Image: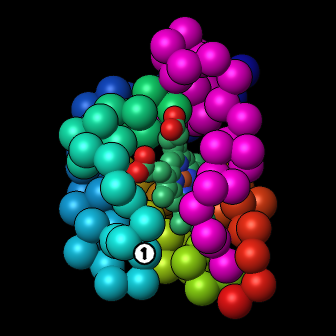
Amino acid sequence: MNKSLFDELGEENIKVLVNRFYDLVFNDERIAHLFKTDKALIKEKQRLFLTQFLGGPSLYSEVYGHPKLRARHLPHPIGIKEAEAWLSCMSQAIATLAVGQHIKDELIKRFVPTAMFMVNKEN
Ligand code: HEM
């Protein structure tokens, strides 16, 4: 059986990824203004979510219920430009991980369609 991306990365890499990602997001003038909640809480939610998104235990759903990600993003105006900014922060954060290139490529492949699915306005 193929290992999930969660198995390949492990909990520590997911923590590192989430930390670096939001440090970039909160300093990115294209999207930083959208994030209004406490940074530590956003990081923790994303750690729980990515654990299950990448094939690990359903930590996010245990606490917050069904992710309904697109619905949860509707209050935030997201166009293609914002999705690209999000993906560029995520790509940069992924690039810093100490894992093989194949894993990095697989991660990007998972994030691109999900980010595009969040687009809810025209730029
Ligand atoms: C396409 C660009 C995206 C933008 C601009 C964006 C922006 C946001 C914003 C503004 C929030 C609310 C933060 C707050 O509470 O202040 C949020 C929450 C969240 N986002 Fe995104 N997001 C994007 C894509 C994604 C993707 C691709 C994923 C998952 C792979 C994701 C996962 C989450 C999660 C899990 C939350 C927390 C939801 C909750 O409140 O429980 N987002 N996002």
Judged from this view, the residue extending furthest toward the top is 62
Query: Which residue is rendered at x = 22% and y = 62% of the image?
Result: 23
Task: Check if residue 108 falls in the magenta segment.
Answer: no
Query: Which residue is rendered at x = 22% and y = 40% of the image?
Result: 40
Judged from this view, the residue extending furthest toward the bottom is 123
Q: Position of residue 114 (x, y in %)?
A: 70, 56
Question: In the rendered image of this protein, does residue 25 appear above or below residue 110?
Answer: below
Mark 1, ligand 1, within 8 Å: the answer is yes
Residue 24 horizontal side relative to residue 75, left or right: left
The amino acid type found where label 1 is placed reads Ile
Between 49 and 42, the one nearer to me in the picture? 42
Q: Mark 1 points at which residue?
A: 31
Magenta span covers which residues? 50-79
Query: Which residue is rendered at x = 63% and y = 17% of the image?
Result: 65
Q: Quadrant of the C terminus?
A: bottom right
Question: In the rendered image of this protein, does residue 72 appear above or below residue 76?
Answer: above
